[in-house]
Image (cartoon, rainbow, N blue to C red):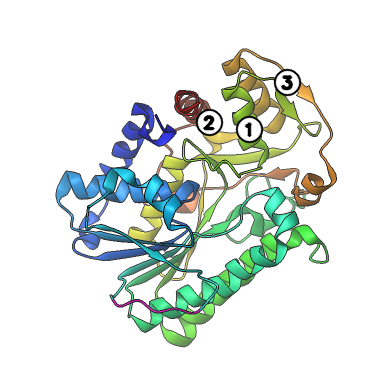
Amino acid sequence: MKAYDHPLYLSDVEDIARLDLPWEKLAGKTVLLSGGTGLIGSCLVDVLMKRNSIENLGCTVIVLGRNEQRARERFLAYQGNPLLQFVRQDINMPFALPVKADYVIHLASNTHPVAYATEPVQTIMTNIVGLQNMLELARSCGAERFAFASSNEIYGENRGDVELFDEKYCGYIDSNTLRAGYPESKRCGEALCQAYARQYGLDVVIPRFTRSYGPTLLESDTKALSQFLRNAVRGEDIVLKSEGMQHYSYTYVADAVSGLLYVLLLGASGEAYNIADVSSDIILRDLASELASIAGTKVVFDLPDATEAAGFSKATKARLSSAKLQTLGWKCRFPIRVGLHHTVEALIAQE
């Protein structure tokens, strides 16, 4: 059994697919997304396809990607369903589609430390050049709305003046570092979206995700939580590669997708929205202890290697306020301990 076939994950997907949202906006429409086989993208596909089956929505989902085999394996459950299509495409190259996309969502991005350190150019280009190609596609086909998946990383380091980052907060980033490629390119990406909105009248929204996790976790993901989860699933001690005093926001993948849908379907044009909740804010050391408790193991400390260390965030406190998103009606459905249990159980079943 794959983790995304586990009953807990499937129940979470259905829970999101039954939310009281204006789904009629997607009826008979086409949703195009990059990063469709990633952590958040693949869950979004599952939710949209579940909504199709619940309500006969007739929403066509087109997934862009470079690896057709991986997409076929991930979405095997929808084989033969004309409402899910795959288009092989490197989004860092200009392209066109023979059909109109009504909603365009740019989710593709490197999102973990080793990739930031070993593929810094690709990381930046996907967030800028890849984004521009997606924006151009949306503009050329007259898309109704464009969504750019941004990140809590754009806030930089907490200056010590706030407890929670709202959407206007601006912390410190040392741009003259290798690690700065990810947050700075996300910042530039947001500015590019605003430029397209002003110059071309494109309707854009910007969901800002925080550290996300769930059963759709990719094997290549090297984030601290991802490594903790793999340790827990294998019944190993949880390896902490710092003192663990970092205080971050985390989001279970189903909540990340529901937040994206609220922003896509209800958000104000041109606005950014944090997707996070205080019920999932936790100190890294406590997060490690929670997973050690689930696994019946303990927390051990180990130094990172040079490549890992180069990709680590320097932020020690990055907690996001979701007050703006909550005005749209969104609420967290899977606080951290619930999300961790669902993730571990699904991943164990896959082992």
In the image, 22: left or right of 266? left
Q: Which residue is mark 1?
A: 282
Q: Nearer the viewer, residue 321 or 15?
A: 15
Residue at 75% x, 61% y: name it. 180
Q: Is residue 222 above or below residue 236?
A: below
Between the C-alphas of marks 3 and 2, the distance is 18 Å
Callout 3, which amino acid? Val
Residue 62 in the image, given as x and y percentages of width and height:
33, 62
In percent of width and height, residue 277 lies at 52, 40
Q: Is residue 95 magenta?
A: yes
Query: Considering only order in the chain, which callout, 3 or 1, is on the residue closer to the N terminus?
Result: 1
Distance CA(mark 1)–CA(mark 3): 16 Å
Q: Nearer the viewer, residue 341 or 239?
A: 239
Give yes or no for residue 219 being in the magenta stretch. no
Residue 3 lies in quadrant: top left
Q: Earlier in the sequence, mark 2 or mark 1?
A: 1
Under circle 2, the secondary element is: helix
Q: Quadrant of residue 144?
A: bottom left
Q: Amino acid at mark 1?
A: Ile
Q: Are marks 2 and 1 in contact (CB under 8 Å)?
A: yes
Give the residue furthest to the front: 69
Q: Which residue is mark 2?
A: 336
Span shown in magenta: 94-98
Which element carries disc 3, helix, strand or loop? strand
Kindly check if marks 1 and 3 are in contact, taking CB atoms under 8 A apart as contact: no
Q: Is residue 228 left or right of residue 272?
A: right
How dense is the environment of label 2, judged by Cα within 10 Å: few (below 14), some, or many (20 and up)? many
Q: Check disc 3 and report the residue beneath it.
A: 299
Occupied quadrant, residue 97: bottom left
Front residue of this view, candidates 106 and 346: 346
